[in-house]
Image (cartoon, grey):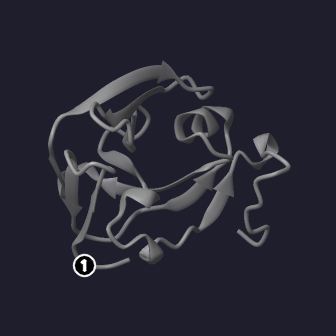
């Protein structure tokens, strides 16, 4: 990914734009991500907070992570789409859900994390 990127929730009430390169892109198979997405994993990428412009009102759900950090999951209050996460261990970054990109084909995952929690019905490329 390079240049300015844009994305939005399903209903369009929340939109975003960011510049620069993502710092890390991944599939996360932890149980929290499974529950947050309703699928077998979450696909996300990290962006520096100061490179993100967020439009619209997001709602937050806060929870403790296994690492001891605090996770703030954001979602659209109208359509419920997950948008991004904040992690207290990375105060200057946001983790954006890849499916919210206007061009989701530009997402290139680098790694799978928490593979030990994978579901047998959720195939993720074993080469990552």
At 67% from the left and 34% from the top, the residue drawn is 31
Q: Residues within 10 Å of mark 1 (few under 14, many from 20)?
A: few
Image quadrant where one finds the N terminus: bottom left
Q: Quadrant of residue 123?
A: bottom right
Q: Is residue 46 above or below residue 93?
A: below
Tell me if 28 is positioned left or right of 97 in this view: right
Up the image or down, 117 lies above or below 111; here it is above
In the rendered view, would you say 74 is above or below 45? above
Query: SS of the residue at dot 1?
Result: loop
Q: Residue at x 63, y 39 (%)?
A: 34
Identified at 43% across, 77% down, the residue is 106
Q: In the picture shown, does residue 94 fall above or below 110?
A: above
- Apparent side of residue 19 relative to residue 29 in the rendered image (left or right): left
Tell me residue 9's x, y (percent): 31, 50
Residue 27 position within the rendered picture, expressed as x and y whole percent measured from the top left: 61, 56
Q: Tell which of 90 and 74 is nearer to you.
A: 74
Disc 1 marks which residue? 3
Q: Is 58 positioned to the left or the right of 125 in the image?
A: left
In the figure, is residue 116 to the left or right of 128?
right
């Amino acid at each position: 990914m390079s240049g300015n990127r844009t994305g939005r929730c399903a209903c369009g009430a929340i939109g975003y734009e960011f510049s620069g390169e993502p710092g890390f892109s991944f599939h996360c198979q932890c149980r929290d991500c499974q529950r947050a997405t309703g699928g077998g994993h979450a696909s996300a990428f990290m962006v520096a907070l100061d490179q993100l412009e967020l439009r619209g009102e997001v709602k937050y759900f806060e929870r403790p992570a296994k690492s001891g950090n605090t996770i703030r999951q954001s979602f659209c209050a109208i359509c419920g789409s997950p948008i991004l996460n904040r992690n207290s261990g990375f105060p200057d970054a946001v983790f954006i859900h890849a499916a919210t990109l206007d061009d989701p084909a530009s997402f290139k995952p680098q790694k799978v994390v928490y593979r030990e929690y994978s579901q047998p019905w959720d195939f993720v490329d074993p080469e990552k």
